[in-house]
Amino acid sequence: MDFAASFPLVLPELMLTGVGLALLLVAAWGGDKAARQIAIVAAAALFAAGLLIVPGLHFGVDGPATLAFGGLLKIDSYALFAKALIYLSAIAALMIAPSFFASPAAGTERGMRAEYPVLVLFAAVGMSLMVSANDFMSLYLGLELNSLSAYVLAAILRRDTRSGEAGLKYFVLGALASGILLYGMSLLYGFTGGTSFEAVRAGLTGEMGTGALFGVIFVLSGLAFKISAVPFHMWTPDVYEGAPTPVTAFFATAPKVAAVGLTARVVFEVFGGQVAAWQQIVMFMALASIVFGALGAIGQENLKRLLAYSSINNIGFILLGLAVANADGASAMLVYLFIYVAMSIGCFVALLMLRDEEGNLYETFTDIRGLSVTKPAIAWALLVFMFSLAGIPPLLGFYAKFVIFQATIEAGLVAFGAIAIAASVIGAFYYIKFVKVMFFDEPVGVVTGKSETSHWVLLGLTALIISPLGYLLTPSLTDLADKAAASLFLAV
Amino acid sequence: MEGLPILSLMMCVPLAGAALCLFAGAAAARWIALGATLVTFVLGIALWANYDIGGPQWQFTEEANLFAAFSYKLGIDGIALMLIMLSVFLMPVCILASWESVTKRVGEYMAAFLFMEVLMIGTFAAQDLFLFYVFFEAGLIPMYLIIGVWGGDNRIYASYKFFLYTLLGSVLMLIAMFWMVAEAGTSDIPTLMEYGFPAQAQTWLWLAFFASFAVKVPMWPLHTWLPDAHVQAPTAGSVILAGVLLKLGGYGFIRFSLPMFPEASAQFAWLVFALSMVAVVYTSLVALVQADMKKLIAYSSVAHMAIVTVGLFAFNVQGLEGAMIVMLSHGLVSGALFLCVGVIYDRLHTREIARYGGLAINMPYYALFFLLFTMASIGLPGTSGFVGEFLSLAGIYQTSSLVALICTTGIILGAAYMLYLYRRVAFGGQTNEDAAAMPDISAREWVMMAPIAAAVLWMGVYPESFLAPMRKDIATLDARLAAAAPAGDARLAPGTPRDKAANALEHHGSEHEGMEHEGAKEGAH
């Protein structure tokens, strides 16, 4: 075991941890007055961490050279791809936060709390560990570092009861899920005699015993909670609605990427020899998420709740790629994740921009009636995101669904794909309701608030990615995703 | 024209126009839109003029590897050429039709129409299966907005119905496309058109494509979105919907279902015939009792498109040629009829037939145009409708005399409902004072109507101009279908055919003789 060789591999995490700790001290002494500066430094640190992984991402890294700390972590192309997405989403979450917390809607007189950027940083470190875990111990460490930061983030508006409720619900249910996951891990350890992914995989060969199967199921259930797949999705709408909007935007993107990345690694690298044992479970979760996510969204009046159901729906499609159980499916899943992150950030930024003069956020369908007349730029951007989420070409959301279904059909799961794609039409119903409210109804809510430049920049950037021009990105995106997926299947 | 990517250019012009319109004021947007559509139309004429009849099957091909999963590959044959011409011809008319009637959010309206034009050209020109799907499906977005924002009172219901119906049909086709590409290893349409899919798989693939195209055409009983969408859409929206979007279904059959799955097409011909026969009779009867002009024309569209589908599945040259001409003719005629409705709707703001009457007295020129298009819709000889319907029915007669018999009643019923409509609107006494006070058509409306009227007559008197570019492609398709073609119940007696058909090209004549020999053998049994 050569620690000297391991440290360069985890340089981004080390740097983020160091910056995070330093900023924590600044926050302790500087107080909330320094929050804005802290956020800027935190974003810069995330950006620098992102730059550090660019070479590895570009050239592709895998094999034994990527193992760090005696196989506890595996920093391969797959981990790097997920990390890049995580850092980008975290930067977005930092960019959109200050003006939200400064508004009276947040109920904080002093604006953004200095802990917010620090917690986002720590969550990012936790997520980095999650996606590069190669051992159930490091997996759990990363997961909890992320989850604990997330619980606090959800409840960061101390005087807002909805935020407190969201934090509490998230914590209680999250702890339960962690327990289930831990129990599954202990079962696997008991039946295979190891915690490292290789050891568990080696122990799971041949005919699988009932105990080990239970271990697999418990681990998958715990992970399903983290990615909010049906039937472990119940917390999502409440948490999304209650949490402050920038935090919701963060939850919908980075932790999703990390948890999906983690799930994919576990099912392929640990349970890869036992595809039959988990494929049906993942298929069921995928279909159920697509259908329930779509049906649940139909009756929603609150836009954040609606986006929560939409994220459940999207997780269903991502799981579809997982259920295919080959490198094409994994690559498609990663492409989908990238596009999903861009769409989600765009949607939430647009929601943050819907404010009245005092800065109170508009959150229901009634408020955004006739938005295309009052704020055409935001309305058109939302239109692009909604049609994209519905998977209508020529927007990039279509490409996301395209690669997923292509992988599904090529793997021979035709009936499965046909059911899933038919169910996706249900989802289109509420996405076009969004457009209907903004474009067809007469304006009532008067969106007058001014929006920050950072919001406009993010909105413009994500809309540009999602627009048909985004298709020009697809060759390089597919190339990166293919490399990442290939490194995931190296062990198989 | 070598080297000039004219198809891409035809898509770029309206796209640029759409982008400009979004930011322009109302008056400027109208002129930009008109300019862009006219430039595209001129480019279209250049396209037709440079199309080499009898040359290679695919012309004006372009290819660029811009995307990961599919390529940007364009190219047209005669069939696509004619449908592109129809689109670019109707577009300036649509812009003119909305000149005064659309007053709110003009820039966005014009942008939606120009974007629609890009997608229509793209759909007909795409040579990659997935590129086709992208263009085909993307049309939902502008059409949803056009119906929803600028439509009538019940526009929301109509726009939802239009969107969800079409989407559900299309996604099943997408699944089939994935399967085909996985099987054949390419998404290149010309290659796939010659690929032999296993007969077992063809059945499923055909049904999946049918789900999409039958909704678009629309075939009974999937037609119910059409009357709603037509009635609620603004006039120009109806023109585009009837004129071009319905043709996407027919184009889909002729480009995909027939050449890619010939065996399955023969296997399911009975289904198409049955649905079409019901459609012809049923929707014609429904049209007869409509009190709303637009609804009446919408139902007549369903009936006419049923003639298209029987022609397509007749599996012979006459049927295919007839189907294409009916599509072109119906695109012009129903578009023009919707314009006629739009003209009087703009004056009186009602589509109720009973509110008009005696318009021939105060609007003689209008009545003249309306009469011409009414007659063309019925299929009077000398108009485009006659050529198409005659060929189509002649084609189907060779395959099934029963289907021909029932579909021919459509012409009689068509005469009934169209003449009845015309009598109530244009003839009789001037029972309504406000209708009697309406002024005759303006110069702008002249400019809209006259070119369509000229095209209808041209196609009716000299259809060769339109048939010639398609002849070779239809012959190729017919040859591809020959092995699978059903025997047919017509026992054609072998007469003494002349050397060539009156208007045949060299290759066509030999094709024709071969067929008649087939018929002779049949007759000998």
Image (cartoon, grey):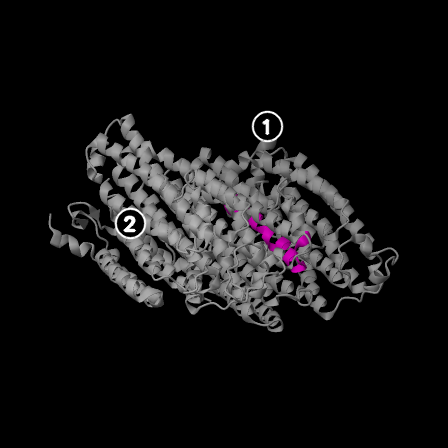
The secondary element bearing badge 2 is classed as helix
Q: Quick check: B99 left or right of B481?
A: right
Towards the viewer: B343 or A306: A306
Q: What residue is pinned by disc 2? A: A145
Give, as a single range, the part of the protein colored magenta: B231-257
Towards the viewer: B197 or B479: B197
The secondary element bearing badge 1 is classed as loop
Residue type (three-letter) at the residue carrying disc 1: His
Please say if the residues under marks 2 and 1 sit with CB atoms less than 8 Å apart: no
Residue B496 visible, this orientation: no
Residue type (three-letter) at the residue carrying disc 2: Leu
Going 28% across and 43% down the picture, which residue do you hit?
A265
Please state the chain letter of the residue tagged with numbered disc 2 in the rendered image.
A
- Check the picture and name the quadrant holding the C terminus of chain A: top left
| Magenta span: chief secondary structure | helix
Q: Quick check: A453 left or right of B524?
A: left
- Determine if the magenta segment contains residue B233: yes
Q: Is residue B44 above or below residue A422?
A: below
Which label belongs to residue B525?
1
Q: Is residue B168 above or below residue B149?
A: above
Please state the chain letter of the residue tagged with numbered disc 1 in the rendered image.
B
Q: Quick check: A77 left or right of B100?
A: left
CA gap between label 2 and label 1 equals 85 Å
Which label belongs to residue A433?
none
